[in-house]
C-alpha cells in the first residue's frame, strides 16, 4: 500500500510579516502588501514596486554570527524552517531538533529547496566592495552565500540534517518541484522526515534587471504600486515580485500518527510536465499544463469534480493567464465552470522560487477555515479568461476539502499539487 504523505508543520514569511496567521489575516482583510521599492534606485526600471518584507530583523531569530555569513534568502528559509519544526513538535527546548540526539535519526531527515535567484543581495554588495575597495575587502563568505544551493547547506548545518538534499531551480515552479520530490522520497522509504518549500529575496539591482529583461514584469508598477499585480484582469500586464519563504515538514501519515504529531493536511497528489515550446513563453494551447493537473489528480485518486478550489499560478502576463485558463478548461472539462480559481498572490506579489509554497500555506489555511481568499485587483475579467476567479473579496464556502495548487515557470515548467483536509 502506498504511504499517505501529510504535512505536520509549516513556517511562512511574507511581505505582511512572519507567520501564516498574519498572512491569512491580511488576505482576508483585502490589504495589499505591495509598496514602492526602497532598497535601491529603481529609476531605470519599469517595475518599481514589490512585496517587501520590511521591518524584518534577522537577529531576532538567528545569531549575528550566522546572519553575517549568509544572504537574506537563506535567512528567510532558516526562520521559516524553525517555525515549521516547532509546529511539528520536532524541536527540543534548546532549539535543537529532536533527531540531533541520535546519529541514525539525522540520517533519515532530508531537504528539498526551491529557489530561483539565489543570494544576489550578498553577491552585489561584495562585488561593489571588489570594484570600489579592492579584493581584500570582499567577504570570505562570498563563495558560500550567493549560490542557490547555499540554503541547502546552511539548513543542513543549522539543523543537523544528513539525509537526502536537493535544490530545484524551475523559476516560479521551483517550490512545487521541491515539494513533489520530497513526497516521492518519503513514499519510496528513503527518509522518514522531509523539509521542503521555497525561499526568495529578489530585491537587488541585478536581480530586478534580470527579470525585467524577460518582459514578464508589470509596467503599471512604474507609477503605481498596490494594485499593479492584476491576474486575469483586463488590465493585466505582468507580475510583481515579492520577498518571502514557506517551508513544510512532510512525513508518512503512519509515522506522524505514531508520534502524535499535528496533521495540517494531506499532500495526496503531485505531478510536473514541460511544454517544450519556448524559453520564456508558455505553450498557448495549455495541453501539457493540463496534463500536470490531471496526473496530479490521478495520483491523488481524485476526479476534477471533487476539487473544491484551484490556486492558480496567476502571473498576470496576458498570454500566461489565457493559456492557464485554457489548461484548466482542458483538465476540468465541464467542472471548470463550477470550481473557484483563486490567486491570493495578487495582494502581495509573486515570490518566484517560493511562490507555490506560499500558495500551499494559504490553501491549508483556507481548508481549515472554509474560506477561499479573493483575487485582489480583479475589476474586469480579461478577454478569454472566463472562469470564476473569486474577484477581490474572500468567499466563505461550506465545503473545502480538496485543493489543486498550480505552478509554472520560464522554460515551460508546469507543476500541480493536490492538498486534502485531514480528519
Image: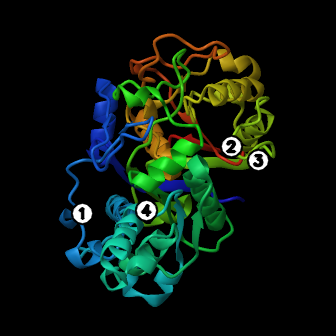
Q: Is residue 81 above or below residue 395?
A: below
From the viewer's perspective, is residue 182 above or below residue 102?
above
CA–CA distance in space, label 3 to label 1: 37 Å
Quarter placement of the N terminus: bottom right
Could you say which is closer to the camera, residue 349 or residue 219? 219
The residues bearing labels 3 and 2 have C-alpha atoms spaced at a distance of 12 Å
| Cα gap from disc 1 to disc 4, whole angstroms | 17 Å
Instruction: Indicate the quadrant where residue 127 lies.
Output: bottom left
Calculate the distance from the C-alpha at mark 2 to the C-alpha at mark 4: 22 Å
* Res 308 visible: yes
Q: Report whether 407 appears left or right of 18.
A: right
CA–CA distance in space, label 3 to label 4? 27 Å
Question: Could you tell whether 324 is left or right of 199 in the image?
Answer: right
> Residue under circle 2?
280
Q: Are marks 1 and 4 in contact (CB under 8 Å)?
A: no
Label 3 sits on residue: 274
Q: Nearer the viewer, mark 1 or mark 4?
A: 4
Query: Total label count?
Result: 4
Residue occupying the point 47% across, 60% down: 257
Residue at 65 percent of width and 71 percent of height: 189
Q: Position of residue 9 (x, y in %)?
A: 40, 56
Marks 3 and 4 close (CB-CB < 8 Å): no
Quick one: label 3 or label 4, which is nearer the N terminus?
A: 4
Residue at label 4? 120
Cα distance between the residues tagged 1 and 2: 34 Å
Amino acid at each position: 500500500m502506498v504511504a499517505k504523505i501529510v504535512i505536520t508543520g509549516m513556517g511562512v514569511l511574507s511581505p505582511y510579516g512572519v507567520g501564516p496567521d498574519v498572512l491569512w489575516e491580511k488576505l482576508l482583510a483585502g490589504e495589499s502588501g505591495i509598496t514602492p521599492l526602497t532598497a535601491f534606485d529603481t529609476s531605470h526600471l519599469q517595475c518599481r514596486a514589490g512585496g517587501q518584507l520590511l521591518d524584518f530583523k534577522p537577529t531576532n531569530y538567528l545569531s549575528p554570527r550566522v546572519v553575517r555569513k549568509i544572504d537574506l534568502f537563506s535567512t528567510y528559509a532558516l526562520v521559516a524552517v524553525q517555525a515549521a519544526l516547532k509546529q511539528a513538535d520536532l524541536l527540543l527546548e534548546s532549539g535543537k531538533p529532536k533527531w540531533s540526539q541520535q546519529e541514525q535519526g539525522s540520517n533519515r531527515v532530508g531537504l528539498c529547496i526551491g529557489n530561483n535567484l539565489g543570494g544576489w543581495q550578498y553577491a552585489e554588495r561584495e562585488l561593489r566592495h571588489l570594484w570600489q575597495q579592492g579584493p581584500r575587502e570582499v567577504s570570505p563568505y562570498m563563495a558560500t552565500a550567493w549560490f542557490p544551493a547555499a540554503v541547502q547547506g546552511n539548513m543542513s548545518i543549522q539543523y543537523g540534517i544528513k539525509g537526502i538534499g536537493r535544490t530545484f531551480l524551475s523559476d516560479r515552479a521551483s517550490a512545487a518541484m521541491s515539494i513533489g520530490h520530497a513526497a516521492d522520497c518519503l513514499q519510496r522509504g528513503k527518509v522518514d522526515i522531509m523539509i521542503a518549500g521555497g525561499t526568495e529575496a529578489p530585491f537587488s539591482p541585478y536581480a530586478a534587471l534580470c527579470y525585467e529583461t524577460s518582459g514578464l514584469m508589470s509596467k503599471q508598477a512604474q507609477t503605481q504600486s498596490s494594485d499593479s499585480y492584476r491576474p486575469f484582469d483586463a488590465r493585466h500586464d505582468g507580475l510583481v515580485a515579492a520577498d518571502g519563504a514557506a517551508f513544510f515538514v512532510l512525513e508518512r501519515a503512519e509515522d506522524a500518527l505514531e508520534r502524535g504529531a499535528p496533521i495540517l493536511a494531506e499532500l495526496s497528489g503531485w505531478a510536473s510536465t514541460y511544454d517544450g515550446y519556448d524559453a520564456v513563453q508558455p505553450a498557448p494551447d495549455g495541453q501539457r499544463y493540463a496534463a500536470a493537473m490531471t496526473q496530479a489528480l490521478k495520483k491523488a485518486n481524485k476526479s476534477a469534480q471533487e476539487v473544491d478550489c484551484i490556486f492558480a499560478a496567476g502571473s498576470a502576463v496576458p498570454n500566461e493567464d489565457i493559456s492557464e485558463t485554457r489548461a484548466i478548461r482542458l483538465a476540468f472539462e465541464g467542472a471548470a465552470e463550477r470550481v473557484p480559481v483563486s490567486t491570493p498572490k495578487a495582494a502581495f506579489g509573486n515570490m518566484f522560487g517560493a511562490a507555490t509554497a506560499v500558495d500551499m500555506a494559504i490553501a491549508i489555511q483556507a481548508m481549515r477555515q472554509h474560506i477561499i481568499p479573493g483575487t485582489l485587483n480583479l475589476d474586469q475579467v480579461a478577454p478569454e479568461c472566463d472562469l470564476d476567479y473569486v474577484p477581490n473579496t474572500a468567499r466563505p464556502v461550506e465545503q473545502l476539502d480538496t485543493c489543486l495548487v498550480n505552478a509554472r515557470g520560464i522554460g515551460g515548467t508546469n507543476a500541480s499539487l493536490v492538498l486534502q483536509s485531514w480528519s
